[in-house]
Image: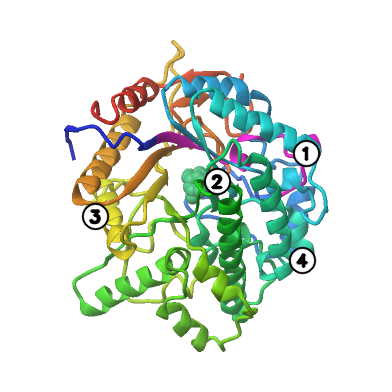
Amino acid sequence: MKSEARSAFPKDFLWGVAIAANQAEGAWQEGGKGPSQADVMRFDPDLDPRSIETIGSRDDVERALADVSGVYPKRDGIGFYETYRDDLELLGQMGITAFRTSIAWSRLYPRGDESEPNPTALKFYDDLFATVRHHGMRPVVTLTHYEMPLHLVTELGGWRSREVMDHFLRFAQTAVARWSPLVDVWMVFNQLNTGLLDPFLALGLLDVPDAEMPAVKMQALHHQFVANAAVVAMVHRANPDALAGSMVLDMTAYAASTRPADVLAQVQEEQATLFPSDVLVRGAYPPVATRYLREHGNSLDIREGDLELIAEHPVDYLAISYYVTRVVGEGPTSLDRIGWSINGDLPNPHLASSPWGWQIDPLGLRTALNKYADRYPGVPILIAENGLGANDVLTSAGEVHDSYRIDYHREHISAVRQAIDDGCTVMGYLAWSGIDVVSASSNQRSKRYGFVYVDLDNVGAGSERRIRKDSFDWFKKVVTSRGRAL
Ligand code: BGP
């Protein structure tokens, strides 16, 4: 899809990049930080990076924490905890107006159950957000991005526990009270709907017998919905003009064929994967969730006031990450499955793939945006992540020629432009990841997404030098022309 941008994007459109604390900061044990789920994820060069490992038991966690062989490398990131001032200065040179990152919950509350936050972490984020502002960017802050204090996972059972929700709300209150003067776009959860597929990473669930998983997963999600509503209220109390939202992974699915059974399966899969955003935006459980609960014994513990809170505090905007589209046929929906393959079960013969098998579908983004516009009329959609993971090559001249990344973003931004022309309300476009970070699913550094190359390899060796890729200057032109020069 080649296309010329005709007119500028809206004036207040957010142009930016996104990273996450657990994939960039490193320093996983410095400044008083405690371990989180990210620190027990596996890295194995022989593991197929397309299969995302799901950690299931406390034993898995203990083995990973004790490991010194490098198979469980702990999240050493790109050293952003030390380099953030220089990195933000460099990223700011692209003229971007927004920078998304997350707060490491396990930095502020290393075990999660302390009554007072860690002062070193408070100072770190004070300076981080002030630096973002200093370089002309608006901080978009995710409260938790695949990262919670591991103690809450192993000792309290993660989000299945109401007590964990209370610990989260104390953490959120600390963050919102302290940084509201600097932050006016808050994102409570990253990819909230992936709790359906990855109970450990997204919900901190361990040792749940298969038969109990459906009910436990729903309970944990219920606590996240209540927490989301409570934080939306908190943000508005702190600053009535601030925006509070949460993010979901876009899981747009195509039917595998025109067989009516496949078409029904596609509709049901979208009901399943969109049910969390339905709750966030509409403030109520949709019929698919009620049906699912009925089929699994109606065991949800809903306390007095929960549903009212969810109804009273819907999100101001919905954030999505967009990477791929999926193809689904007759079979169980994501509500009934655990584990994910990023494209769904079936390949789409009409699409090319990244080296990691992620199928590239710019037009699918236009489809997705139109779907949200119809489903949630008037609710602004923030594209909080979109990008291409690739094996970039640093030439002997110290350059990175990533024309494939330029093509990828050009085509996706064109699709956004067309969706806006279709009538969709799009709040901004944040490229994942601006600067190379560690990949969430594979723990690899060779799966690079940035406009800035970081000279570190898969095992963390390298000079840590930052090098602008060709895409850096290209994105700068896009941003400064407000999307006219694509
Ligand atoms: C999203 C996550 C990010 C990010 C991105 C790319 O699911 O929110 O954290 O990493 O996907 O995924 P990966 O790093 O696995 O290629």
Residue depicted at 25% across the width and 74% down the height = 263
In depth, the one of 305 and 254 nearer the eye is 305
**N-terminal of the two: label 4 or label 1?**
1
Residue that carries the numbered disc 4 in the rendered image: 156
**As drawn, 23 above or below 60:** above
Question: Does residue 322 appear anywhere in the picture?
Answer: no
Residue type (three-letter) at the residue carrying disc 1: Gln
Can you give x and y, in whole percent of width and height, for residue 42 in the image? Answer: 63, 49
Q: Closest to the observer: 315 or 114?
A: 315
Disc 3 designates what residue? 349
Q: Which mark is residue 29?
A: 1
For the residues labelled 4 and 1, the Cα–Cα distance comes to 22 Å
Task: Give the residues in magenta.
Answer: 15-36
The location of residue 199, given as percent across then percent down, is: 59, 64
Secondary element at image label 2:
loop
Mark 2 Cα-neighbour bin, 10 Å: few <14, some 14–19, many ≥20: some
Q: Which residue is mark 2?
A: 440
Q: On the image, which quarter does residue 449 sit in? A: top left
Q: Residues within 10 Å of mark 1 (few under 14, many from 20)?
A: some
Q: How is the image coloured?
A: rainbow
Q: Nearer the viewer, mark 3 or mark 1?
A: 1
Q: CA distance from mark 2 to mark 4?
A: 24 Å
Res 151 quadrant in image: bottom right
| 326 horizontally vs 310: left or right | left
Q: Amino acid at mark 4?
A: Leu
Q: Is residue 364 above or below residue 410?
A: below
